[in-house]
């Protein structure tokens, strides 16, 4: 279809496909760096500021995630409409989308600052029984600092949307990587002097400001992105807000679903218990970024397919293709964690954090369903039917809060993870797959048949890793065992996937990329 265009058009398509593949690989590289930094960062924080201060940092981060969700009011809408108008070649509307979004963000920035100040007061009353006065003072200060940080992130969304729409993933991830690597070095130096979580928050703010400035300059001077205001377009503004209404509902539901656990744990068990739970959440958060990396670069492509002919069969093929890639990667990470995870956490964080292994594993297994189907959320956004996920996720998030409180009393902090896992099986496993099949018209039966074939490789690989790990443990000890086992297993898993997992199209794509 598209290849029937001129040669120039064909070259553009190939360039876009190449950029998407490059974007996926760079994103995985960024995630690997993120994981490596995190593995150094967490024990460094625990050592420099202590368990209680780390628990405070994670608790305030959980509270601030609700404010960050305000960014969802417009961020997804900006990306969706900018990509839509780019596919249609409407430059004036592209410019006005960014300009109107900027003005709306100015209003939201005032709103965010007011909420941060109110929360700085409220938190003193809510946690007065479980925190000391000095901890409450620090929490209030952190809320204000992170409120300013949220404003920076929000106002930079228009630059990120423009860079993403132009598929310049190398710079986007490169600038984020620079901030990621710089942050722990600065934090380490500062926390040796100021041993508190507030110092960490200040560093996060500074690095995000520098990253935002670099992305803004790149969008303006390298991509020549115009933010020209063409007058107030009520239809466009309503479109941004109406579309993003579904996004913010989902985002709020996500925050309730993922962050309320830590708030409830802090309320019942204090800051130290939050620190343990947050170590487990660090693991499954990294797993989340790994699982969503492949789908994160496909918004422009899905917009193009949907706007041109609404061909759901072609979109369904893309959904299955991206799902296979995601499962291959998730399967590798999950099997590694099943076998090596417990010993790794003991080495990484200490024996006091052993519950973090069970928390992470209980969540990761059902979470895999959502991660390998993450492109479905992008398809829903482009088709403007995202509201269903908002209602569904909000319902299971509220149920999850009630079940979490019950299971915390019965099972301790691990009960919060069990509650989350049950909710994910119901929501992501049944409700979302029904909608994908019956309402969107995606070929879910074929999707799961493809995943079932790949699951055999993951099971075989996990068994091989278990045997390998026990063998190496008899010869070596400590972190060396974990690292050597992981490296050897990478090659074993890669061989299994290459020989028995990839189809001919996937092998051809990889071969072409290596040649380039």
Image (cartoon, rainbow, N blue to C red):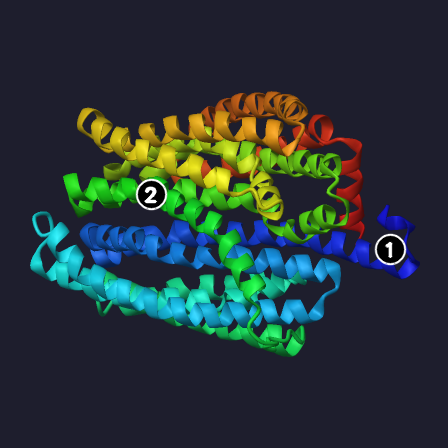
Task: Quarter of the image for the C terminus: give it.
Answer: bottom right
Residue 267 location in percent, x, y? 16, 43
Instruction: List the residue tagged with mark 1.
Output: 10
Question: Spatial distance from mark 2 to mark 1, Cα to Cα?
Answer: 45 Å
Regarding residue 294, the answer to whether it shows in the image is no
| Up-down relation of residue 60 to residue 374 (above or below) | below
Q: Position of residue 204 (x, y in %)?
A: 36, 65
Image x and y of residue 261, in percent: 28, 40
The residue drawn where x is 62% and y is 21% is: 452
Ranked by sequence position, the earlier of labels 2 and 1 is 1
Q: Nearer the viewer, residue 33 or 61?
A: 61
Residue at (59% x, 39% y) in the render? 376
Quadrant of the image for the N terminus? Answer: top right
Residue 475 is tagged as none
**Along the line of sight, which residue is nearer the eye, 512 or 437?**
437
Label 2: element kind = helix
Q: Please name the residue that numbered disc 2 is placed on.
A: 256
Tally the numbered discs. Answer: 2
Q: Which quadrant of the figure has residue 346?
A: top left
- The percent coordinates of residue 64 (x first, y second) are 31, 56
> Label 2 crowding class (10 Å Cα cut-off): few <14, some 14-19, many 20+?
many
Q: Nearer the viewer, mark 2 or mark 1?
A: 2
């Amino acid at each position: 279809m598209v290849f029937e265009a001129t040669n120039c058009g064909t070259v553009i398509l190939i360039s876009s496909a190449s950029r998407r593949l490059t974007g996926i690989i760079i994103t995985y590289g960024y995630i690997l760096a993120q994981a490596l930094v995190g593995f150094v960062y967490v024990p460094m924080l625990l050592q420099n500021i202590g368990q209680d201060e780390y628990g405070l940092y994670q608790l305030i981060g959980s509270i601030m995630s609700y404010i960050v969700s305000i960014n969802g009011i417009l961020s997804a809408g900006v990306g969706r409409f900018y990509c839509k108008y780019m596919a249609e070649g409407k430059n004036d509307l592209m410019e006005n989308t960014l300009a109107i979004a900027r003005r709306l963000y100015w209003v939201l920035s005032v709103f965010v600052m007011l909420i941060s100040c109110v929360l700085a007061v409220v938190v003193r009353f809510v946690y007065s029984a479980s925190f000391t006065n000095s901890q409450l003072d620090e929490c209030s200060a952190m809320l204000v600092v992170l409120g300013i940080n949220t404003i920076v992130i929000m106002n930079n969304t228009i630059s990120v949307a423009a860079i993403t729409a132009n598929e310049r993933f190398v710079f986007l991830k490169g600038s984020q990587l620079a901030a990621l690597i710089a942050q722990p070095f600065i934090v380490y130096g500062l926390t040796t002097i100021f041993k508190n979580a507030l110092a960490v928050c200040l560093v996060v703010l500074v690095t995000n400001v520098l990253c935002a400035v670099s992305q803004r300059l790149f969008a303006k001077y390298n991509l020549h992105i115009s933010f020209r205001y063409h007058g107030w377009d009520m239809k466009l503004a309503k479109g941004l807000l109406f579309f993003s209404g579904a996004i913010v509902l989902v985002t709020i539901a996500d925050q309730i679903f993922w962050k309320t656990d830590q708030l409830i744990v802090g309320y019942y068990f204090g800051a130290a218990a939050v620190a343990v739970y947050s170590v487990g959440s660090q693991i499954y958060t990294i797993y989340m970024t790994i699982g969503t990396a492949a789908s994160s670069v496909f918004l422009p492509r899905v917009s193009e397919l949907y706007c041109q002919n609404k061909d759901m069969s072609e979109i369904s093929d893309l959904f299955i293709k991206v799902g296979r890639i995601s499962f291959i990667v998730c399967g590798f990470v999950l099997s590694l964690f099943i076998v090596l995870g417990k010993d790794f956490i003991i080495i990484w964080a200490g024996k006091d954090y052993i519950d973090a292994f069970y928390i992470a594993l209980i969540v990761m297994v059902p979470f895999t369903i959502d991660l390998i189907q993450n492109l479905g959320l992008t398809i829903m956004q482009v088709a403007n039917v995202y509201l269903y996920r908002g209602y569904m996720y909000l319902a299971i998030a509220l149920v999850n809060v009630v079940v979490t409180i019950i299971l915390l009393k019965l099972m301790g902090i691990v009960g919060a993870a069990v509650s989350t896992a049950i909710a994910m099986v119901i929501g992501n496993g049944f409700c979302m797959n029904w909608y994908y099949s019956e309402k969107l018209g995606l070929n879910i039966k074929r999707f799961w048949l493809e995943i079932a074939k790949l699951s055999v490789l993951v099971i075989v690989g996990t068994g091989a890793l278990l045997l390998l790990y026990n063998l190496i443990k008899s010869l070596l000890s400590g972190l060396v065992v974990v690292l050597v086992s992981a490296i050897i297993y990478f090659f074993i898993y890669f061989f299994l996937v290459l020989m028995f997992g990839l189809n001919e199209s996937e092998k051809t794509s990889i071969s072409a990329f290596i040649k380039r």
